[in-house]
Every structure is written in structure tokens, then in C-alpha cells.
Image (cartoon, rainbow, N blue to C red):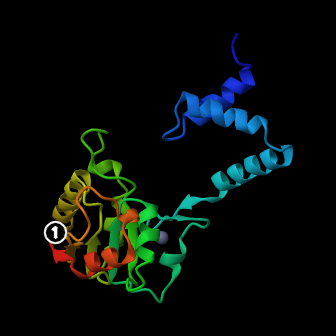
Amino acid sequence: MNYPQSFIDLVECFKRLPGIGSKSAERLAYHVLSMDKEYVQEFSKVLSHFQDNIHYCQKCGHICENNICEICQDETRDQSTICVVESPKDVFAMEKVKEYHGLYHVLHGTISMIDGKTIEDLNINTLFDRIDDQVKEVIIATNPTREGETTALFLAKLLSKKNVTVTRIANGLPIGSNIDYADELTLLKSLEGRKKI
Ligand SMILES: [Zn+2]
């Protein structure tokens, strides 16, 4: 005997989430079965509200509820420095380092042979549009993984055509690690020890 169709539909939806296999998806569907009607309604409302209201900033690619994020709108921030990161998670991690007051640019990924991702698949055109006379330094803070390093080198090469200093965060972070898992002190040291590339 098969599961009822509505149950199967929900399981299929859960299975599309990262890290959720068939068993976990079924477990979650059973859990929804036991949830209060009000909670399920609230949950679906929040989900749909999230989809309608969370966008990527048109300038830097960070997540926000307006066209332009709070960081890009903040004129008190150092407009001469742009820190390039892989994902919005990294912006939140870098923001914990209170000493950084510049702007960001989110690539939404890295160059990856395995996933077939090239430089064109990244949020890169808007970065080049942003580099004007005001911008003096671009700090490349992609993760210290093979993909992150490849992306950093590629970006540095492309940016060498622009009149801007390009730096790479220092190797204080363990190889293969992610910026959003690093503690604030490690991130600060890595930022302070950045080198020209
Ligand atoms: Zn922004």
C-alpha cells in the first residue's frame, strides 16, 4: 500500500532540501501530521512571506528585504574597500569582526570543475561595475578551499585590469575550512594579515 498522495507530495518537497534523504523526509512529514493546525498555517505563511520579501541586494548580492541592503545604504561605511565573499553567510561572519567597516560583494558560489561552475556563473559583472575611482582595495575573502583559491586567483587576474589594489586574506584559516565557521579572532587576524595578489 502506498502513502496517500498529499503525504507523498510533502515528502517530495522535503527531499528537495539539502541533506534530507527519503527517511528524514518521511520523518518530517509524520511530524507535520502531529503539529497544531495554527502552527502549520503560521509556518506556511512565514515561508511564503520569506520568498516574497527576501531578495539579493542589487548592488552587492547580500540578502535583504529591499532592493539595496543596509550595508550598501550606509554612507558611514568605508566606500573605498570591498570585501568579496562566497555567500551571504560570510557577510554575517565578517560583520562579527567589528574592525571591518568596508563594503561587501557576494559571489554566490565559486568556480567549480565538479559542479561545472565557471566565472560567468558568479555574481561578478556587478562587482566590476562598482569599481570606480572611489574604490581603492578589493579584499578577496573566498574560503581557503581549492575552489575558493581558484576563484581568488581568477578574480585577481581579472581585477588586475582595474586601477585597484587586490588583496587576499591571510592563511590564518585552516585549509579547506569555511569562513562562516571561523571564530572572530581568527577572521580578524586573517583580515589584518591580508597580502597583495
Ligand atoms: Zn548590498
Q: Quadrant of residue 68?
A: bottom right
Q: Quadrant of residue 168?
A: bottom left
Q: Residue at x 21, y 58 (%)?
A: 149
Q: Residue at x 58, y 34 (%)?
A: 24
Q: Is residue 30 left or right of residue 146?
A: right
**Residue 177 in the image: x percent, y percent?**
30, 58
Q: Residue furthest top?
A: 1
Q: Nearer the viewer, residue 130 or 44?
A: 44
At horizontal 20% and vertical 54% (from top left) the residue drawn is 150
Where is 4 relative to 107, above or below?
above
SS class, disc 1: loop
52 relative position to 19: left or right: right
Question: Which quarter of the image is occupied by the C terminus?
Answer: bottom left
Instruction: Please determine whether, in this image, residue 113 is positioned above or below residue 25.
Output: below
Residues 126 and 95: in front is 95
* Residue position marked by numbered label 1 in the rendering: 160
Q: Residues within 10 Å of mark 1 (few under 14, many from 20)?
A: few
Coordinates of residue 27 in the picture (x, y in percent): 64, 33
